[in-house]
Image (tube, helix red, strand yellow):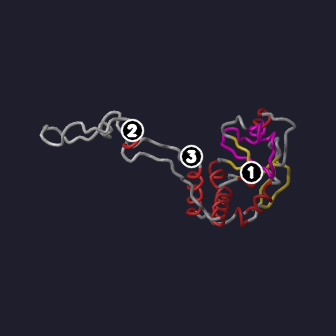
Amino acid sequence: MKLEVFNIQGEMTGKKVDLPDEVFGIEPNEHAVYLDVKAQLANRRQGTHKSKERSEISGSTRKLHRQKGTGGSRKGDINNPLYHGGARVFGPKPRDYSQKVNKKLKRLARRSALSAKAAGGQILVLEDFSFDAPKTRAFKNILSSLKLDTQKILLVTPDYEKNVYLSSRNLQDAGVMRAQDVSTYDILNAGMLILSEGSIEKVSENL
């Protein structure tokens, strides 16, 4: 697949780049994408939730009244979960939510996500650029020139570009990531994927 290369003024440069079919042109495997995204979202969970159960509540363990003969229901101590201020039944405890996904499945999921974006016309190739200093306005001007200022975008760079990253950080619908850090979820979560010219080779090498 060949795509036009744009510059930061939003103009076509006349150059074209070839996106490798083995990365951007495969038949998407939806189940692989599902497994990888599910694992990524699960791995983000802290799992630090905790509520007190009956044995952890501060309160008397005295039986409130005798078992039979009162005409009322049977009652244990004041820590009973049925009472206000009592414990919680089977409450959450700290746990590890992380899930393991095989490397081959991860690569297949990312290739599937990239292929789906390419097939949907949601990939744009941009000439490599950098900023001398962090400038959010300059980054917004680039998006406006490309007519992407109303979309959620992800810019993929070949290496860590500090000033470009800092320029995008205050924009809610814009993100900048290195090619080696991009995940399946990041690709799918972006409305438009912007690949800088040098990142295409890095993405292909990783996948």
Gap between marks 1 and 3, in whole Å?
A: 35 Å
Q: How many marks?
A: 3
What is the quadrant of the C terminus in the image?
A: bottom right
Gap between marks 2 and 1, in whole Å?
A: 58 Å
Mark 1 = which residue? 124
Q: Quadrant of residue 33?
A: bottom right
Task: Characterize the local packing of mark 3: few (<14), some (14-19) or many (20 or more) Cα atoms within 10 angstroms.
Answer: few
Percent coordinates x, y for residue 148 in the rendering: 71, 41
Q: Which residues are magenta?
A: 141-168
Check the image and report above or below for 105 versus 70.
below
Judge from the rendering whether residue 18 lies leftward or rightward of residue 44; answer left or right.
Answer: right
Query: For the residue marked with disc 3, what is the amino acid?
Result: Gln
Is residue 181 shown in magenta? no
At horizontal 78% and vertical 57% (from top left) the residue drawn is 200
Query: For the residue marked with disc 1, what is the amino acid?
Result: Leu
Check the image and report above or below for 112 versus 69.
below
Mark 2 = which residue? 57
Question: Residue 4 — which label?
Answer: none
Judge from the rendering whether residue 192 lies leftward or rightward of residue 100; answer left or right.
Answer: right
| Secondary structure found at label 3 | loop
Please state which of the two labelled residues, at mark 2 or mark 1, is closer to the viewer.
2
- Label located before the other in sequence (1 or 3): 3
Tell whether label 3 touches label 2 (CB within 8 Å): no
Percent coordinates x, y for residue 95 in the rendering: 51, 51
Mark 3 = which residue? 46
